[in-house]
Image (cartoon, rainbow, N blue to C red):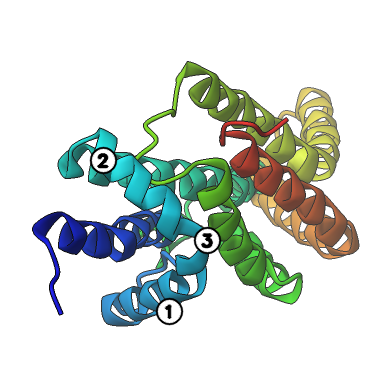
Amino acid sequence: MYISGSGLVEQMAAFMLPLFRIVALFMVAPVFSGSQIPHRTRLGLAMVVVFIVAPVSTLSVQEGVQNASLALAVMFELLVGLLMGFTLKLAFSALEVAGSVIATQMGLGFAAINDPGNGAQIPVVSHLYLVLATLLFLVHDGHLLLIELVARSFQDLPSGGFVVGPESLWKLVTWGSQMFAGAVSVALPAIASLLVVNLAFGVMTRAAPQLNIFAVGFPITLLLGLLVILYGLPAFAPQFSKLLAASFAAADAILPGAP
């Protein structure tokens, strides 16, 4: 049995290049990129996905390696995986921004907790929204849709193709602007309610300057903010579902040939 050097490189590339794309995706994708998931588990899951998508990506990889160096192909795979994962991550970042705005309005901006997914301090309201979003992500089979997305990417964007251009990057920037719109839609009820309360306290302060507005206003604002969050939870699920569907569409749109 004779195996040439070029054939060995092609066989290695058929496995390694898709692995780099999938590992890069799992490094930044929501849920999979959490620090609570060990690196060995993440790498093992990526290898399992590679074996699943290998029949789809093998021919494309072999054609791509003949036209470009292996080092550039690896950089290309890492870039594609990072772009798709970052696009999905923006949906969770929108909820973090919404929670930060609500926490600031209701006086809980100082109450921060460590986020294991990002390794940073975030307000408790943002942490609540991220926990709910993670549960909804798993309930709606977001982890399976993520694997389907990366498998479909090898058909639309073969390994070694080097075709990520300005159009794909511009689609990512456009989706970033939509992320802030999604954050506003989640936080708007609380912002409007707390704004009315702050205006009322401003009128009370002008009418009765001797009133200690901090001692009276802070508990009321905090209680109202908690009530707004409580009664706004039924509308949180459909809003996040729309945001998640838009994030998957945006991740798919950065691939060439996508609408």
Question: How many numbered tags mark residues here?
Answer: 3
Circle 2 is placed at which residue position?
66
Up-down relation of residue 120 to residue 94 (above or below)? below
Q: Percent from the top left, x then y, of residue 214?
A: 63, 44
Image-based side of 234 in relation to 129, left or right: right
Circle 3 is placed at which residue position?
56
**Discs 1/2, front:** 2
Residue 109 visible to the viewer = no
Residue type marked 3: Val
Cα–Cα gap, marks 1 and 3: 14 Å
Q: Few, some or many C-alpha atoms within 10 Å of disc 1 (few <14, some 14-19, many ≥20)?
A: few
Label 1, secondary structure: give it. Answer: helix
Which mark sits nearer the N-terminus, 1 or 3?
Answer: 1
Residue shown at the point (79%, 56%) measured from the top left? 241
Q: Percent from the top left, x then y, of residue 32?
A: 46, 68
Residue 143: mark: none
Q: Percent from the top left, x then y, of residue 187?
A: 74, 43
Label 2, secondary structure: give it. Answer: helix
Which mark sits nearer the N-terminus, 2 or 3?
Answer: 3
Residue 240 visible to the viewer = yes
Circle 1 is placed at which residue position?
48
Q: Percent from the top left, x then y, of residue 217?
A: 72, 46
Up-down relation of residue 120 to residue 74 (above or below)? below
Residue shown at the point (81%, 49%) measured from the top left? 242
Residue 212 versus residue 2: which sits nearer the camera? 2
Q: Few, some or many C-alpha atoms within 10 Å of disc 3 (few <14, some 14-19, many ≥20)?
A: some
Residue 43 versus residue 101: which sits nearer the camera? 43
